[in-house]
Amino acid sequence: MAADQIVEIEGRQLKLTNLDKVLYPAAGFTKGQIIDYYARIAPVLVPHLKNKPLTLKRYPNGVDELPFFEKNATQHRPEWVKTVPIWSEGNKRNVNYILCNDLPTLVWVANLAAIELHPSLSFGQDITSPRSLVFDLDPGPPANIVQCCQVAVWLRTIFEHFKLESFPKTSGSKGLQIYVPLNTKTSYDETKPLAHALARLLENEHRELVVSDMKKAIRTNKVFVDWSQNDEHKTTVSVYALRARERPTVSTPVTWDEVEHALKKKDPKLLVFESKQTLERVEKMGDLFAPLLSLKQKLPKLPGIGQGEAEAVASGLDMAAQAQSRERPVRTAKKAASAGKRPSPKKARKRI
């Protein structure tokens, strides 16, 4: 591949530079291959980025060198690259975030060596209203993604009690991330306390494996349930985004069957996907994260949830379990982890 090329994409002309520069030294993966991946994955990636303020994590000298975050769009950008002004209280000014709404913009971003893409959970025009609830499950060594799968199954069971669908994806790094699509009017004042309460409830009931505090000292061989990502000032790596690891791994959507299979086999390699594999999965399975774009769900209104109290969720689960016991049996997470089956609601509250 030539070092530089001028290309036309959907009527937009772009100069692509340093295409043969290796940005993943261990894998020999070049900047040109990064751009090629993003161009190929664009049909499923762009809808998840559209209209969301985007933070770039740029690696101009490759994944082995220090990166930098870029929130404010560079002034040296094509006139057709859309931005949205978001007020920064810390900077006391507007920050002009990129809106990656189309293929030309995505390719332009990739050409900046923006290996990792971190969008907001909100649309730029409604920044205080998250489109989803997210949990980032981060394992503290020697724990790995297998232990994250166990916590994810417990989380799914809680959501099922509240009749909420949830969707897992790998972080592309060490852990697993669980998304609950909302697409209804809400605010971070609602989602963040609920996420905190859920994390504390899991910690209370599974202290041998779960922590809800990010202090490194207490995370050894445990899974940190990061609830704090539910904040208008924070971002989470995008679905289908590359990660700056030794090899070009991708934050890839997975099925709950795959999560349970990895847990049963205790094999973390089952949930590691590089760029080529992710493209093949999309070709075969489509966009497993498509419901995040349109599925409308409302969070439960739980008394006392304002400060993130675990007791509020526990009380809500009791009510949900009683209601569901009159409708249909629901499997528990404890058995789901060991036997791939979920128990009745009466046992579910005792051990999520």
Image (spheres, rainbow, N blue to C red):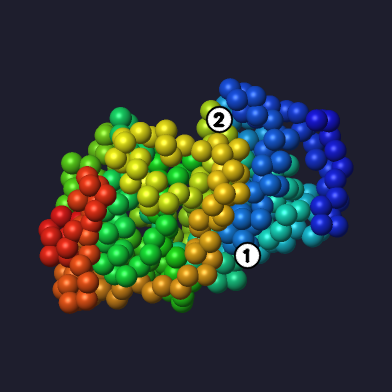
Q: Residue at x 22, y 45 (%)?
A: 338
Neighbours of disc 1 within 10 Å: few (<14), some (14-19), many (20+): many
Nearest to the observer: residue 130 or residue 276: 276
Q: Residue at x 68, y 47 (%)?
A: 40
Relative to residue 74, is residue 63 depicted above or below? above
Where is residue 67, by image quadrant?
A: top right
- Secondary structure beneath dot 2 equals loop
Give the residue type that dot 1 points to: Asn
Neighbours of disc 2 within 10 Å: few (<14), some (14-19), many (20+): some
Relative to residue 19, is residue 152 depicted above or below? below
Nearest to the observer: residue 66 or residue 326: 326
Where is residue 137 drawn, in percent x and y?
36, 46
Dots 1, 2 in contact, CB < 8 A: no
Q: Quadrant of the N terminus?
A: top right
Q: Is residue 44 left or right of residue 221?
A: right
Relative to residue 46, is residue 302 depicted above or below? below
Where is residue 26 drawn, in percent x and y?
58, 22
Where is residue 192 drawn, in percent x and y?
36, 63
- Secondary structure beneath dot 1 equals loop
Q: Is residue 281 left or right of residue 76?
A: left
Instruction: Work out which residue is located at the far front of the displayed protein and give it.
Output: 284
Q: Residue at x 50, y 63 (%)?
A: 292
| Residue 260 in view here | yes
Where is residue 181 drawn, in percent x and y?
45, 65
Q: Which residue is mark 1?
A: 51
Instruction: Work out which residue is located at the far top of the displayed protein and give it.
Output: 26
Q: Which residue is mark 2?
A: 247
| Residue 307 in view here | no
Q: Is residue 163 left or right of residue 10?
A: left
